[in-house]
């Protein structure tokens, strides 16, 4: 009897053991081993939302005239739409008990006309981002577009340093002068820590990359330290403070981000910006995840992560959760009411400033200036473009009208022509080219008068110096794509392979041949220069005649740097009498209206568009001439200069050998 009871008990225990094993094996997501079970259940989940390079694009755009609050439309971006997307993800994650962090990787300022408000005591972008609940933002190069003094006032207006409690402003390798408000008032910080609701500690630091710094005008008040050394220091400090996860918020570009990940491998995630790349999947460099969300608020980056405290490793969960890495910000998101109201108020303020800056000619940023049947394209890079021709024609012809003197040449850099100009494509906007769209393309910078926009400057240089300017733009395209110049009033051909004779090792200094330009001609007619036909005269080497050139002030500021490195390409700006004008007296070269206002690049382009012949509807229409290019900048092939040099050296060597052999033969005789 007792034996039977023991047998029944044994069978019962065996049944419970087998049942438990079966249940554990069948439960989804639970590994079979005890070790795996422990590591899975201890994972800490969190989500990083991110943007970069918003460039003051507060409203839906590309083009903005297509946006309609009540109709389906193809306009992209807009901070009110973005706010709705962020709020929706946060709500879903809140229900799942998962914390969310929201970061921006810099250049939230500069680009669209809303950036102009920074010069008038407003901090529109950062104020809205605080309302949206951004946890941290990095400072990019365009935050300095109006200089460090204006940036300091901008941050003070946004409530800093107290506002760091809302949204951290980060810049770990930036060093302002001790007495400058940026440093003295604690307006930016190197790093910060976030204690999440699930117990996870995330350390963040901000960084601006070397390529971003190169695009900025030098300022004695600011220093930018080695990014890799700064990153190492920040990572060490954050780890010492107990950070589980390290996030670098960088304004450097993907290539520099990859190098950063190799140099500082303890960074878990890099939220990047600067190169405007839409990474539809993260880039992996070692164990570091690199993400970037395009530009202008077209996407919201969504990175779903899990941290394992046992291993210290981070893994991505987007695919298992069926979540995209980039969420398009489009018509599917209704505007967030609170953010939309803020944008509307800032638009009202902007319109008042536009009315003031244009003398009442325009009073609404969405005014239709002209109509077009095609896109005015700024592509492809490193070549003549339709928009480049339109912008430089505007500068040449409008400056000629304002100065009352013939302007021979106008030049503008690709970096100032930010984007293509898109006409409207909807029933309510078909063909419309708005004030907003033009300014978004060419509204960068500010002048000595405190108003927005690069001022147009008027200088005189010799024909020889014009050819040097062409050589410089060909040379710089190898190193700085944004420095490639578009032109009006001339045409030329060049062989890019002839630009550099050799590069000096260690200092990476190119030695120019000054023979890349194979032909240069000046247009002597009036109005738009033809793609072919007569009206051109050659610009010859050694030509000492003075020619009237207009460009923008920033291009002139870069000339001393080129002259210091390459004195054989020196260009000396002169007045109409041929007297050199030092750059310290740059204000003497600025083109002014009769009432004393500076002539801005954006103003010239808006005026030129508004002055085009009207169509059947009475609205100015962009001529078909600008639908394509006009043969102003032509790549050509000639036998490489270095090839001629090699042939000459080979001929000399052959001659020496011949003479030596001949001498030896004579000795034998």
Image (cartoon, grey):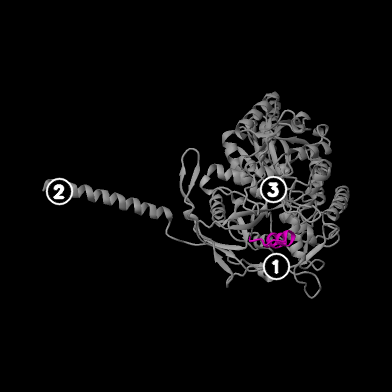
> Is 399 left, or right, of 360 in this rendering?
left
Residue that sits furthest to the bottom in the current view:
616
Upstream in sequence: badge 3 or badge 2: 3
**Residue 363 against residue 89 in the figure, above or below:** below
Give x and y (percent) for residue 81: 81, 52
The label shown at residue 19 is none
Q: Nearer the viewer, residue 385 or 340?
A: 385
Identify the residue under disc 3. Answer: 293
Residue range in magenta is 393-408
Question: In the rendered structure, are the residues bearing label 1 and label 2 in contact, judged by CB atoms less than 8 Å apart?
Answer: no
Disc 3 packing (10 Å; few <14; some 14–19; many ≥20): many
Q: Quadrant of residue 550?
A: bottom right
Magenta-drawn stretch contains 540: no
- In percent of width and height, residue 264 lies at 59, 33
Task: Provide the secondary structure element on which disc 2 rests.
Answer: helix
Write down the residue under mark 1.
Answer: 374
Name which quarter of the figure residue 272 lies in.
Answer: top right
Which label sits in the foreground, 3 or 2?
2
């Amino acid at each position: 009897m007792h034996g039977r009871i023991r047998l029944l008990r044994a069978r019962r225990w065996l049944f419970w053991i087998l049942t438990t094993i079966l249940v554990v094996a069948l439960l989804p997501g639970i590994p079979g081993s005890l070790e795996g079970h422990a590591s899975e259940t201890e994972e800490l989940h969190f989500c990083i939302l991110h943007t970069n390079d918003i460039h003051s694009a507060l409203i839906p755009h590309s083009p903005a005239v297509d946006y309609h609050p009540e109709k389906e439309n193809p306009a992209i971006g807009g901070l009110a739409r973005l706010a709705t997307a962020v709020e929706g993800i946060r709500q879903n994650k809140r229900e799942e008990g998962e914390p969310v962090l929201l970061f921006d990787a810099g250049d939230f300022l500069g680009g669209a006309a809303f950036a102009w408000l920074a010069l008038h005591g407003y901090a529109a972008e950062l104020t809205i981002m605080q309302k949206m609940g951004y946890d941290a933002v990095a400072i990019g190069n365009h935050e300095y577009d109006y200089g460090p003094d204006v940036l300091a006032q901008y941050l003070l207006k946004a409530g800093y340093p107290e506002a760091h409690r809302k949204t951290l402003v980060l810049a770990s390798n930036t060093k302002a002068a001790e007495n400058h408000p940026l440093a003295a008032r604690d307006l930016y910080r190197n790093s910060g820590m976030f204690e999440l609701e699930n117990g996870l500690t995330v350390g963040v630091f901000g960084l601006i990359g070397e390529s971003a710094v190169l695009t900025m005008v030098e300022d004695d008040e600011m220093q930018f330290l080695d990014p890799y050394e700064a990153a190492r220091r920040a990572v060490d400090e954050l780890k010492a403070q107990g950070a589980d996860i390290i996030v670098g918020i960088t304004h450097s570009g993907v290539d520099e981000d990859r190098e950063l990940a190799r140099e500082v491998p303890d960074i878990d995630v890099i939220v990047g910006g600067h190169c405007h790349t839409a990474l539809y999947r993260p880039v992996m460099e070692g164990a570091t995840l690199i993400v970037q969300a395009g530009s202008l608020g077209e996407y919201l980056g969504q990175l779903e992560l899990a941290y394992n405290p046992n291993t210290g490793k981070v893994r991505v969960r987007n695919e298992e959760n069926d979540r995209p890495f980039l969420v398009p910000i489009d018509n599917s998101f209704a505007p967030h009411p609170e953010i939309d109201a803020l944008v509307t108020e800032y638009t009202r303020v902007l319109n008042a400033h536009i009315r003031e800056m244009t003398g009442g000619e325009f009073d609404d940023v969405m005014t239709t200036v002209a109509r077009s049947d095609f896109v005015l394209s700024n592509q492809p890079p490193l070549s003549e473009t339709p928009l480049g021709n339109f912008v430089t024609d505007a500068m040449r012809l409008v400056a000629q009208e304002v100065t009352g003197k013939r302007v021979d040449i106008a030049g503008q850099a690709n970096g100032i022509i930010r984007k293509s100009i898109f006409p409207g494509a909807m029933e309510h906007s078909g063909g419309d080219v708005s004030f907003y769209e033009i300014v978004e393309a060419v509204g960068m910078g500010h002048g000595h008068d405190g108003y927005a926009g690069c001022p147009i400057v008027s200088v005189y240089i010799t024909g020889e110096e014009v050819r040097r300017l062409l050589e410089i733009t060909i040379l710089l395209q190898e190193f700085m794509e944004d420095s490639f110049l578009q032109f009006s009033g001339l045409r030329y051909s060049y062989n890019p392979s002839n630009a550099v004779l050799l590069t000096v090792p260690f200092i990476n200094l190119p030695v120019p041949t000054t023979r890349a330009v194979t032909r240069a001609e000046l247009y002597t007619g009036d109005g738009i220069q033809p793609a072919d036909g007569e009206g051109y005269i050659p610009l010859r080497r050694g030509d000492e005649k003075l020619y009237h050139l207009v460009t923008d002030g920033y291009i002139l500021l870069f000339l001393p740097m080129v002259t210091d490195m390459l004195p054989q390409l020196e260009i000396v700006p002169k007045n109409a009498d041929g007297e050199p004008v030092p750059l310290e007296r740059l204000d003497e070269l600025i083109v002014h209206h009769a009432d004393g206002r500076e002539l801005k690049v954006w103003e010239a382009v808006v005026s030129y568009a508004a002055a085009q012949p009207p169509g059947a509807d009475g609205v100015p229409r962009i001529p078909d001439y600008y639908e394509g290019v006009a043969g102003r900048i032509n790549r050509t092939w000639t036998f490489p200069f270095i090839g001629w040099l090699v042939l000459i050296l080979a001929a000399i060597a052959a001659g020496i050998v011949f003479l030596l052999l001949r001498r030896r033969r004579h000795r034998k005789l």
